[in-house]
Amino acid sequence: MVSNLLTVVDFRKYISVEPEKRFGKPVLTGTRISVYDVLNWLANGMTEQEIISDFPELNSEMIKACLAYAANRENRLKLIG
């Protein structure tokens, strides 16, 4: 039997909010690259490897952290009405 365990990325290790960077938007720590930027690149068809090639300061864990951050935000939204 094959185990179907997922490794959960702790996005808090990779994402920070700093008022002086990108108007306080969530960014990948140590960069000025926002979570939105990474999610937008993925949504528009860039692969993880293409993003890392264009931005070598990023790594696979950082990109996964952006996805985990978005999933966490989505899970916390509450519908009103």
Image (cartoon, helix red, strand yellow):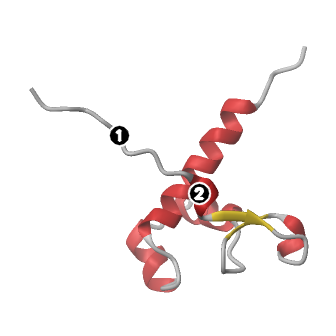
Which residue type carries mark 1? Leu
Compare marks 1 and 2 and give the one earlier in the sequence.
1
The residue at the point 57 percent across, 66 percent down is 41
Q: Residues within 10 Å of mark 1 (few under 14, many from 20)?
A: few
Rendered view: 66 above or below 55: above
**53 horizontally vs 34: left or right:** left
Find out whether the residues at labels 1 and 2 contact each other: C-beta distance under 8 Å. no
Q: Is residue 78 above or below residue 51?
A: above
Q: CA distance from mark 1 to mark 2?
A: 16 Å
Q: Is residue 79 left or right of residue 71?
A: right
Q: What residue is rendered at 67% in x and 67% in y? A: 37
Judged by depth in the image, the label closer to the viewer, 1 or 2, is 1
Residue 66 percent across, percent down from the top left: 59, 57
* Kind of element beneath mark 2: helix
Horizontal placement of 43 versus 21: left or right? left
Q: Disc 2 marks which residue?
A: 66
Residue farthest left in this picture: 1
Q: Which mark is residue 6?
A: 1
Query: Residue 60: which numbered mark, if any?
Result: none
Q: Residue at x 30, y 35 (%)?
A: 5
The extreme front residue here reads 13
Q: Secondary structure at mark 1?
A: loop
Q: Residue furthest top?
A: 81
Q: Residue at x 90, y 14 (%)?
A: 81
Residue 1: quarter of image: top left
The location of residue 67, given as percent across then percent down, is 55, 51
Question: Badge 2, how many Cα within 10 Å: few under 14, some, many 20+?
Answer: many
Give the residue type that dot 2 points to: Cys
